[in-house]
Amino acid sequence: MSIDRRVIVLPDKHALAAEAADRFVATTTRLLRERPAVHVVLTGGSVGIAVLAAIAAHDQCTAIDWARVHLWWGDERWVPSGDPERNEGQARAALLDHLAIPAENIHTMPASDSGMTLDEAAAHYRDELLRAGGGAFPVFAITFLGVGPDGHIASLFPERPGPTIAEPDVIAVRDSPKPPPERLSLTLPLLNSSERVWLVLAGADKAAALGLALAGAATADVPVAGVGGRERTVVFIDEAASAEVPESLIAPTEYWTGAMDQPDWQP
C-alpha cells in the first residue's frame, strides 16, 4: 500500500457506508470544481453496494453534476446481462437508477451474452478506457475496492496470476476459486494508478487478511497488500474487521473530521 494510508474504524457496516458516502459526495463535489470530469471505479459485494445505496440516500447526492461523472468497474462476473450476480445490476438498483446521469457515462463491462469471448470482452473494455482517456487510461479520482476473507480485491485472487501482472490492463480471469470461475478484472497497476483508493470492508472474517496486508504481506499471497492510491489510501472498516489493525494506522476522530486531507473534506 501507499505510504499515505489511514484506517477509519466505524461502529458497524451502516456507519461505515454512511461515512464513505459522505466523503465521496464531498470529494466529488470539490473535484468537479477543479476539473471537467471525474472518473470513479465502483466495486460490488455487500459493503460496496451498501456504500452506493448510502450515496443515493445522501442529501447532497442530487447536487453533484453527474453529467460530468464517469463510472467504471474494477471487475465483473462473466454471466449474462440481467443476472443478479452482476455487479452492474446491483449498482444500478442501489444508486445508478436514481441518478440523472447520461447512459454513456456508465461504462459497464461486457456480459457473457454480449456476443464476445471473454478475451474479446477484456480487449473491448481496455479500448473503452483508452478512448475515454484520449489514448491513455483515464485518471481515476476514486476507486472503491472490497476485500475478500482471502485478501482478494477485484477479481485478483491469491496464488493466481492476476495479482502479479505488472502492466496496467484489463484481463480475463478463468480460474477464480470463487464462483463463477470466469470474470473480467482491472490489474493492480491500473487500480493503483488511481489518485485515491478507498477500501471498504466489514466483518470479523476480513480481519486476518487486512492485518496481513497492513503488515506487508506478499501481494501474490494477499492481493490487497499490493493496493495503494497515488495520493492516498483510506481503509473504511467496522469494529469487527479491526482486530488486527496496528493502532498507529487507526485515524483519530479529529483526523477524520478535519485534519485529514482537509482539501478533500471541505464541502
Image (cartoon, rainbow, N blue to C red):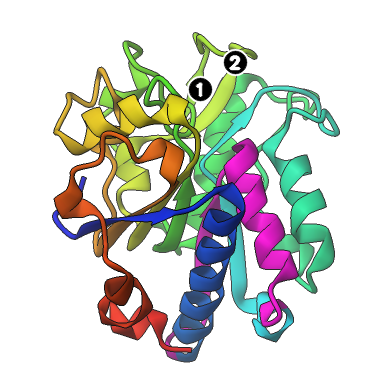
Q: Is residue 85 visible?
A: yes
Q: Earlier in the sequence, mark 2 or mark 1?
A: 1
Residue 45 locus on image (x, y percent)? 61, 36
Q: Is residue 69 above or below residue 92?
A: below
Horizontal and vertical percent position of residue 143: 45, 54
Taking depth in this image into account, of 203 and 28 the one nearest to the observer is: 203
Q: Quadrant of residue 89?
A: top right
- Residue occupying image coordinates x 21% and y 45%: 1
Residue at 76% of width from left, 59% of height from top?
96
Residue 194 lies, in percent from the top left, at: 35, 57
Label disc, if present, on residue 172 of the rendered structure: 1
Give the residue type that dot 2 points to. Glu
| Res. 166 visible in picture | no
Mark 2: secondary structure: loop
Give the residue at mark 2.
182
Q: Magenta segment range?
A: 34-61
